[in-house]
Image (cartoon, rainbow, N blue to C red):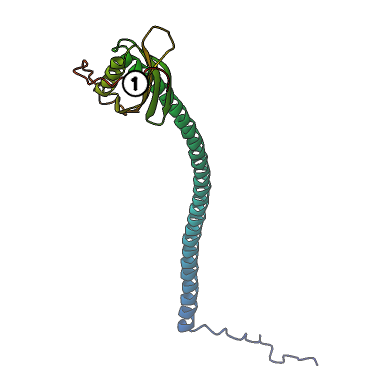
Amino acid sequence: MIKINLLGQARPKAAKQALPLEATLQVLLAIGAFAVAAVILFTVYVSQKRQLDDTNKRIANLRAEKASLQQIKQDVDRFESEKGVLQTRINVIETLQQNRTGAQELLEMVASTVVRVDSIWLTSMNRTSNSLQLTGEAGSIDAVADLITQLKQSGYFDKVEINNAKENDLQPGVETYSFEMSVAVVPQNPQSGNQPQTKPAGNTQPLAPAPKGRS
């Protein structure tokens, strides 16, 4: 259908309706609230992200420290094992050294005692723990008694016991006696610095001479 304007005047345009002020304020407040919320959320996100990164970094550092400590623990365990092996070897060496030194000192102690007695010579010496077995020959029974006195007064030995003393006929026409005795070795303390004092043989009671000939 065709419409014809017979009045010859322009048709008035419809007037635009203005938005109420209250609605405008509500829109602006909504936009502002959204912007504030966005800023707050972004700030919280950045803060939480930073804390998460710090936590992950600390976890990584702790893991690295744990791995380092485990390696150190393995090294310590290995060093302790090596230390135990070395200590065992040192103990063996020290024991051997003490035994060697002890045997040398024992010989010196016996020698320094025997040389003070005339007509005495030892033929054998056997040590078992702190007990010493002496076997020898003497020119007289008094020499055997003098040896016993010297052993007791030396400070190196005690509990001297004569096991056997008898005249023998190893050299015809010469009076000789064979003897066997046991003595206890007195432990010496090298750190004390006190050496046993030897005393000259005093009045000793000679042993009764054994019957002549072998028994």
Depth order, front residue of 165/127:
165
Specify the quadrant that holds the N terminus: bottom right
Residue 160, above or below 77: above
**Disc 1: CA contacts within 10 A as few (<14), some (14-19) or many (>=20):** some
Depth order, front residue of 162/64:
162
For this view, does 105 lie left or right of residue 68?
left
Specify the quadrant that holds the C terminus: top left
Q: Is residue 164 visible in the rendered structure shown here? A: yes
Depth order, front residue of 106/123:
123
Q: Which residue is mark 1?
A: 210
Residue 207, above or below 75: above
Residue 171, above or below 214: above
The answer to which image quadrant residue 99 occupies is: top left
For this view, does 111 lie left or right of residue 74?
left
Residue 109, above or below 55: above
> What's the residue at 52%, 83% (across, down)?
18
- Amino acid on which the number 1 mark rests in the picture: Ala
Depth order, front residue of 96/188:
188
Q: Position of residue 36 (x, y in %)?
A: 46, 69
Q: Position of residue 177 (x, y in %)?
A: 37, 16
For this view, does 98 lie left or right of residue 160?
right
Q: Residue furthest front?
A: 212
Q: Position of residue 14 (x, y in %)?
A: 61, 86
Q: Is residue 189 visible in the rendered structure shown here? A: no
- Report helix, strand or loop for mark 1: loop
> What's the residue at 75%, 91% (across, down)?
4
Q: Residue furthest left?
A: 203
> What's the residue at 30%, 18% (across, down)?
147
Q: Position of residue 205 (x, y in %)?
A: 22, 21
